[in-house]
Image (spheres, rainbow, N blue to C red):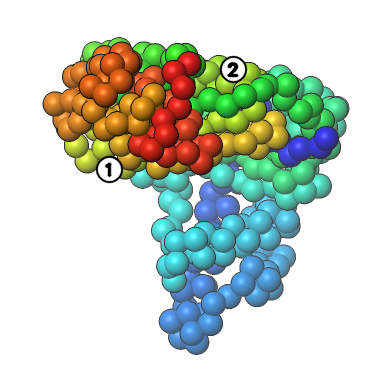
Amino acid sequence: MKQTKTLKVRVKDKHAAELNRMARSVNFVWNYLNELSSRAIREKGLFLSAYDMHPYTKGAGKDLGLHSQTLQCIAAEYVARRKQFKKPRLNWRKSGGVRRSLGWIPVNTGAAKWKNGQVFHNGTYFKVWDSYGLSTYKFRAGSFNEDSRGRWYFNVAVEVDVQPTLGQGAVGIDLGLKDVATCSDGGRLENSRFYRRMEDQLATAQRARNKRRVKAIHAKIKNRRQDAQHKFSRKLVNQYGEIVVGDVSSTRLAKTRMAKSVYDAGWSQLKTMLEYKCAHAGIVFKVVRETNTTRACSSCGSLSGPQGVNGLRVRVWECVECGVLHDRDVNAARNILSLGAGRCPQEVGIPVL
């Protein structure tokens, strides 16, 4: 079975100057299309498509040092984002200053190839740390992207052979703060509090106005969180055939006094990982409404569990109806699993595992 997968490899730093130059040209084209589109809407009431924009940029690639297909990719991306945000004009891409836009150079299918052990694009060879064996893949669309530390990466979509997962059964996942994720089988992704553990180092670097060190610490926090979540999500995808997650909203909780802990947990990132890995492995992924999953007993369905802000302190509770002792998070995960199967925990409950 064939699946599309995106590979990300680091570009060596000696190419940063050339990539930065190309990124500035990309920003120039984006801003030109932004002004062109807004004027067409304002003066003629006409929403230009990507095809309509191509004649306005035709031939500019040679002067700007960009591949001709890159100009087409910029127009297509601009129109897609304009439709997404429903705005007549988008934000400008800035090539300098404090709020500088991170570098982005789109690459169309066939515009980048693997030649002589390097990525060949727009007449230039880019050396990369090849951790995937890129010579065995045929490149599709992709892009060069810059991170906050000024490091460049080459991201490219390729086709890979995928073996169906051998995982069986289903698992429910309750997202929280004490533990980032708790499974219905009792498994947990502990909250290592990556940000809070390095908060003192970050504060020291900020007081010293060491911007380079601040960016490095933020990157380390991000990488550690991603590593833990990648390992956890991969384990679940390999083990189960269906994964059900509660629809907890980090946006709402971020407006409370728990905002720092919510952002540190990274729920949205974990759900995104589970979703695309499930799709890639050919297994079921569901997001269900988790209302009352903490209060409801997973055995009898009675609403006898802790509730409210004060109830967050209660980690273990006993059902007044059936007398079963519950771990708060495991019970919620079992109810989420029940909802994923189409059953209402308040009516029928599910057996204690």
Nearest the eye: 138 or 19: 138
User: Looking at the image, which residue is at 76% across and 28% down?
Assistant: 164
Check if mark 2's residue and mark 1's residue have beta carbons within 8 Å: no
Residue 322 in sight here: yes
* Mark 2 → mark 1, Cα distance in angstroms: 29 Å
Residue 326 in the image, given as x and y percentages of width and height = 32, 16
Say which residue label 1 marks: 252
Q: Secondary structure at mark 1?
A: helix
Residue 322 falls in image quadrant: top left
Say which residue label 2 marks: 235
Which kind of residue does numbered mark 2 sit on?
A: Lys
Q: Residue furthest bottom?
A: 44
Which is more N-terminal, label 1 or label 2? 2
Nearest the eye: 8 or 106: 8
Q: Which mark is residue 23?
A: none
Residue 225 in the image, given as x and y percentages of width and height = 44, 20
User: Looking at the image, which residue is at 26% across and 24% down?
Assistant: 321
Nearest the eye: 242 or 45: 242
Residue 211 in the image, given as x and y percentages of width and height = 33, 25
Residue 122 falls in image quadrant: top right
Q: Residue furthest left?
A: 310
Q: Residues within 10 Å of mark 2 (few under 14, many from 20)?
A: few
Q: Secondary structure at mark 2?
A: helix
Residue 120 in sight here: no
